Amino acid sequence: MRGDKMKITVAQTAGFCFGVSRAVNRAFKESQTREIVTYGPLTHNSHVINKLEKRNVYAVSNLDEALGKTLLIRAHGVSKAVIQETEQKGIEYIDCTCPCLKKIHSIVEKSSLKGDIIIIAGDKTHPEVYGTQGWALNGSIAINNPDEVFLHKFDVSKNYTVVAQTTIIEENFNAIIVNLRNLGLNLTVYNTICDATRKRQEEADFISKNVDIMLVLGDKKSSNTTKLYEICKKNCEKTFLLHQFEFLVLKNASENDRIGVTAGASTPPDIIKEAIEFMNEAEKNTQSFEEMLDDSLVTLRTGEVVKGTVINVTATEISVNLKYKSDGIIPKSEFTDDSNADLTALVKPGDEIEVYVTRVNDGEGNVLLSKKRLDSQKGWANIEEAFNSHTPIRGKFQDVIKGGMMASICGLRVFVPSSQVSSRYVDDLKKFKGKEADFKIIEFDKKSRRIVAGRKELAQQEEKESKDKVFASLEEGQRIKGTVSRIVEFGAFVDLGGVDGLIHISQMSWGRVRKAKDIVSEGDVVEVVVLNFDKEKSKISLSLKDVNNDPWFDATVKYQIGDIVEGKVVRMVPFGAFVELEDGVDGLVHVSQIAHTHVPKPDDVLSIGQIIRVKVTEVDIENKRISLSKKDAEPKDDEDEAEEAVADDAVELADEAVADEAGELADEAVADDAGEEASELADVAVADDASELADVAVADEAEDEAAELADDAVAESAAE
C-alpha cells in the first residue's frame, strides 16, 4: 500500500495508566538517591523492568531481601499482612498502591468486619487479586469467568460482597454477577473496574470494529494487555499482540487498509511512540510497507557470524531479532554446556548478542543460531595464542574421566592429565569439579583437534606466592580468618589463603575436647589467633580460644585456699586424679589426698565422670595449677574410726603383755639362790634370754590379738 493512502488510528487511552505511571516514575526518581527494591515486578513489561534494573532497581519476593533498603510497593498493592510484616521488620517503604486498589481494599476489609464473605471477580494468580484477598478477614473466593461460579459451594444463609479486578472485562464481570444471583445468594456488588481500564477497553472495542489491522502493544504477561487483545480479536481478525512494534505484520497489508493501535496499561510511552513515528514516516514515504521492509532486512547465510538483539528469553531458548524476515532462535544446548544454567539469569531482552548462523530455515521459518559454535571458533584462536605465547588461560574443571579430568577452556573441552591437576598427587579428583583456574596449554594440535592442558607448574607458583603473601602478613597474636580444610585426630587444618595452619585439639576450647569434629567441620569459616609460625618449615600454630574468656583470669577469686567445691573426675594418672572444676580449669587430687586410708591406685576409689567434693589446698595461677584434697573435704566415716581404734587397742595390749612377762621373770629371779655368783650370772643370762623371748612372744601375741580385734571391728562396722 502507499503511504498517502494509509489511515492510522491511535487510541487516546493507550499506554501507562495513572497507577503504573506513578509507581515507575517514583522508582526512577528515588533510585537516584537510595537503594530501591520493589515487592514483585513493578509492571508486567520486560522493557520497563530492564530499564529499572539498569538503574539497580530489582524486584524481591521475600521481605528479608529488603532489609537495609527502601521497599517500593507496586501499583498492584499487597496484603495487609505484608504491610504489617514490613513495619515489624523496620523496613522503610513507599506505598505506590493504585488509589483504585486502596478503595477496593477498604471495601473488602469493612465488609469482612461485618461478617461478609468476599468474592473477587478476577484471576486469582494475578498479584492484584492475591493482594486484595489478603484484606478479607473471613476468607475469599476468586472467580475468573462465569462458568467458575458453579465450581464453588455457597451458603445461601451467608452474606457475600463482590468486588472486581480493576482490569477484568466488564462483560465478563456482569456475567459472573448474573450466575451468582441465579444461585439465590444475598449479594452486595461493587463494580470496581478501573474507569481508565473501562475507557481503554471501550475505545479498543470501537477502533477494532472499524479497522482492517489492529495492533495491541504490550507484554503477554500483562493482564490488561491480554484482555485488550481478546476484545480486539473478536472484532478484527488481523489483530496482533506485539511486545514491541514490528512492522513485519504489515508486510501483506493492502493499499487501503486501515490500521488501529492501542496499548496496555503496562506499556511504556516510548514503545507506543516508536510505533507511531514509524507509521507516520510511512505515510510520508512513497515506498510501500513491503518495500520499506525489504530495505531494512539483512541477508543471512549459514556459517555467518551476525549480531542481533535479544527479544525474549525462556527456560529452553533465546529469541533474537536479526533484522531478518524471521527471528533467530538459540536453543539452550547451543548457548551453554551447563544443563542446570538459568537462561533468564544469563541474558535479558534488550541485550546485544553475537551469534553463529547454523541454519537459515529450520523448517518452521526460524533461523537457528548458536553461541557455542561462535565461542568454539574464538576459543581455538585464543587457545592457540596462549600455546604459542606460553601464557596462562582461564578455564573450569568439568568432569572426572579415566586418567584425569576434562576442563572447559574458551568453550572447548580440554583434557587435563591427573598428574597435572595440582602441584601434588590428588587422591580424589572430584573435589576439583566445577572449580575455575588458570591453565597452561601443554599440547595443541588443531588438525587432530587435540588440546592438553595442565596446572602443575602454575599451581606450584601460585602456592609459593600465596605462602609468601601469608607469611609476610602474619604476626603472633594476630586474629585472622580462614576455612577449615581438613580434620585429623589431633586437630584441624585451616586454609589461610593458600597455606594451612594447625589448630591443635588442645587449642580448640578452654574446655575439654574429645574430637575436633565436635567443634568444627570442613568448610567452616573460623577466626583464629596466630600462636607462632615458622616460614622455613611452613608451620603455623593457631588457636580458637578467646583470650578474653580465659577462665584462669579469675581463678584466684573463684577458688581460694580452704574452699570446698565440686568437680568432675576427667583423667587418672598413677599419682592421682585430675578434676575439672569448670571448662578449662582442672585441679589435681594427689593419691595421698583421695582418702583417709591408704589408696594404692586412684581408680580403686574414683571413676571417670564421677562428681566429687574437694578442698582447695594450693593455687598457682602463673603455672595454671590447683592442688585439691578429697579426704579433707569429707568427714571420716565409721570404717576409718574403727581402724584407728584397732590400732590404739593393739598398742595398749602390747604394753600390758610386756609388763606382765617382765614381772613374772623378776619374781623367779628373787626366789633363786642369790648367794652363788655363778648361779646369779646364769640367772641374769637366763633372765636376759627370757626377756628377749618374752618380748618376741608378747609381740607375736599382741599382733595376733590386734588382728583379731581389727577383724571384729570391721565385722561390726559392716554389720551396722
Image (cartoon, rainbow, N blue to C red):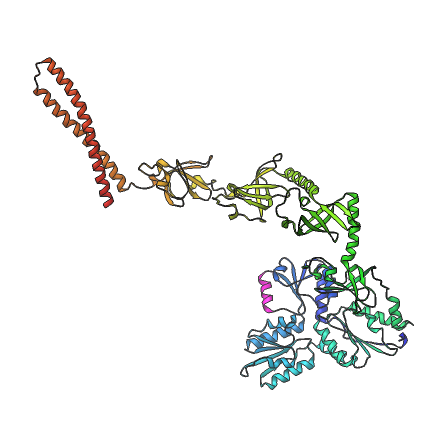
Q: Is residue 319 left or right of residue 6?
A: left
Report the quarter where the N terminus lies.
bottom right
Is residue 639 visible to the viewer in this orientation of the structure?
yes
Asked whether residue 88 is drawn in magenta, I would say yes
Magenta segment, principal secondary structure?
A: helix
* Residue found 76% across the figure and 49% down from its top: 450
Where residue 311 appears, as percent x and y from the top left, is 77, 65
Magenta-tinted stretch = 77-90
Tell me which corner region of the image, top left, top right, bottom left or bottom right, holds residue 579: top left
**Placement of 209 over or under 567, stated as above or below:** below
x and y percent of residue 718 in the render? 25, 44
In this view of the protein, which residue sits in the foreground, 334 or 233? 334
Q: Residue furthest right?
A: 286
Residue 510, x across and y down, in percent: 49, 43
Residue pictured at 79% horizontal, 43% vertical: 389
With 229 as the anchor, is 693 left or right in this view? left
Residue at the limit of the structure toward the top, as seen here:
677
Q: Is residue 33 left or right of residue 378?
A: left
What residue is shown at x 78% (from left), y 59% (from top)?
353
Query: In the figure, 305 relative to 453: above or below?
Result: below
x, y percent for residue 357: 81, 61
**Up-down relation of residue 705 to residue 434 (above or below):** above
